[in-house]
Image (cartoon, coloured by chain):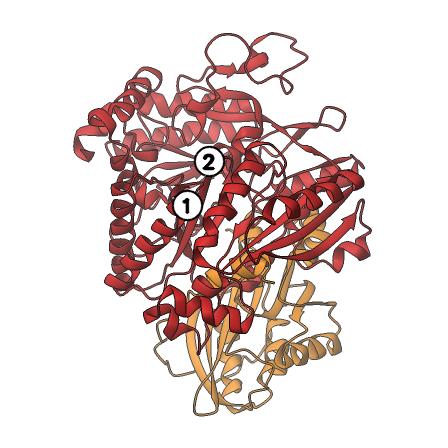
Amino acid sequence: MKVPPGVSPADFSEALKQFEDVVGKEWVFTADDDVDLYRDSYSPLWSEEEEPIPAAAVAPDGVEQVQRIVRIADKYKIPLWTISTGKNLGYGGSAPLLGGSVVLDLKRMNRVVEVNDKNHYALLEPGVSYFDLYRYIQDHKLKVWIDPPDPGWGSPVGNSLERGGGYTPMHDHFDAVCGMEVVLPNGEVMRTGMGALPGSETWQQYKYGFGPYVHGIFSQSSLGVVTKMGIWLFPEPEAYVSGTVMVWKRDDLIPLVNVFAELVSSGTFRGTVVLASPLWFGPPDAELDPLRISGSVKDLEEYGARKQIPFWSLPLYFYGPTKVVAAQWEHIKEKFSSISGVAFQEGPSYRFPLSADELAKIRDTVPLGVPSLQIFSLLPPRSQGHIGFSPIIPMSGEALIEALTVFEGVHRELGAGRAVLTILSSFPRAFVIIDLFPVERDVEKNRKMREIYRRLVKEAAAHGWGEYRTHTTFMGDISNTYSFNHHALRRFHETIKDAVDPNGILSPGKCGIWPKRMRKAEA
Amino acid sequence: MSSRREFLQMGVAALALPISAHAALSPASSILDREPAATPLYKVIFDERFSSSRAFAEEAERLGFSIHGIKGDMTDVWYHDLYARWKEGPVAIAGLTAHGPIFCLERLAWDQRMRVVFRADHRYRADGSIEHALSGPSGMLRQAAALGDEINWSSEMASLVTRCPAMRSQTSQSNVIGPTVKHADDPEHLISWVIAPIHRA
């Protein structure tokens, strides 16, 4: 049996016995074939010595059990790695960052505590999946929408804590968090915001409470185990309209993004778009690919004009009252009409609620708040998984062109194949570029991929672009780039970590933050 | 114009991944004298787009099993059927699908204390044959040796997976190469599988 680093086999056996006393023997997993399920299917370290394999897993079913487990772990200095549903593929899945950790698996804590469709919020346990929440809302005929990411088998609590994104107007998931219940490393339960007021009637309606606002230190964090969380939902809209804005020159991106930024900042548009370049980064094309590699911008533009392929396309969609969304689309067209040659294409439009038959005919339900696993049927046949390099880029056309050029250049220089770069507006005021890399069951290929990934991290940082989130394998690399004033931010994080979690039991190494007792070894 | 989904798909479709070749093992030749009790199957899932998968389902249905067709995406069968059924308790399912559905179903089944207990990766080869890379109870693998002579391999697989033993022996691996005629609508790689509750001593 694997033993956590720095823990004696006798202490570990005793801790496991005590875990069993808390949750029952059937919910403490130590057999290899059980523990193997917590390996990361998308690990870029698969089968390498460095692949972080957990020592065990324990699955409590309530906050009191979490408290007792945390206290036992603290007593024996056993590192715990907390997961909600463990479906965070591409970012580490259910595997810890530190091999030998015990996975604290919260999947049994799957109660929908409340959904309110008058004030549009939910209070959830971490093991609730987007599917669970969607089903609850459907079963209770509530007039609210969730905002699932793609795919939707993960946890709203986990995804929001990791600052994930969806597609509807509630697309910035951490921004939609309102109130948490957290078990601290000493086993104490704390409620944030209005939840600190006993009998509070507004825990999910007012975020800030009184005094310093602490939600943020529990996101992408190792400072507590979130056992309940409030999230804001979207009232079921009356209608949806969509359309695409198309421009034909590369530098049309600059006015296109200027207008888009104004629409986002003014609240005229709320949602995640995929800003695409069908010409530059579109599907493989025998005629077009040579131009992409060695042609000039002008060559591409001429090809696009000839074939009616826009250089940039910006799909937009609106949710709300029928008259309002129609007016929004008309307003959008007016705003973009200042760009020479701009073209508009109407997209699907819907009135809600949709019947089951109507919904079944829609190919992509995720932007309509309906969770799906369809994305897995679109993967290439031999896919073993992928991870994303995902830097935050300023919301300007100039910055996007520069970033795309830099990242494509790294791909070419390191022989990484043609980059397929996707631009998303998952968060207000900035873009995120997603550059997907395959992970394989091939050690050498994964090593090469990691080298390219790390080079991209450095290139991005040198240009002032940092990642918003990453796979556990690269958390230290990303943390190293956030180095202003001799890593003042990381030192601050470490100060908090040492104060709140002096034995360093919760998620050691997460986002580059190590507890004091492990810090030197990792420095 | 390209949709959000098409661009996301393009991103992942760029990930063309080779897979390491399986070492061919000699298939065992004997057939079990007595068949152990089979795992009761709640449902047999197939992909309506693929001829081999349809043939698999036809045979399973002929054998008396309830079948459910998908078109690549398993969300519907899981959300509208298995989600509720598995909440009541684990029940076994089997199928012949592409990678995506079994990848998802396997992980969803883990949460219900079930495992993939039999898996066969079927890969069409350039010489017109098909390779079956099998992993499962040794008794099933011995029976699978017949695939080496079987041109209608998917019907044979249906017969095999629907007889997956309830009490399973040690898991083994083997490779069988057999004759086949690739249907135009079949992908290069299909997977037969059984997901069943785990049994612990």
Q: Earlier in the sequence, mark 1 or mark 2?
A: 1
A517 left or right, relative to B40 = left
Compared with B92, A193 (above or below) is above
Task: Give the residue number, with chain letter if any, for mark 2.
Answer: A162
Count of numbered marks: 2
Residue at the image point whose x is 43% and y is 88% from the top = B126
Task: Give the residue number, with chain letter if any, for mark 1.
Answer: A91
Between A376 and B137, the one nearer to me in the picture? A376
Compared with B147, B6 (above or below) is above
* Chain of the residue on which disc 2 is drawn: A
Q: Are marks 1 and 2 in contact (CB under 8 Å)?
A: yes
Asked if marks 1 and 2 fall on the same chain, the answer is yes
Locate residue B164: give its quadrant: bottom right
Instruction: Find chain B in the image and tell me its colour.
Output: orange
Between A262 and A278, the one nearer to me in the picture? A262
Could you tell me residue A44's position as x and y percent? Answer: 33, 54
Quadrant of the drawing holding the C terminus of chain A: top left
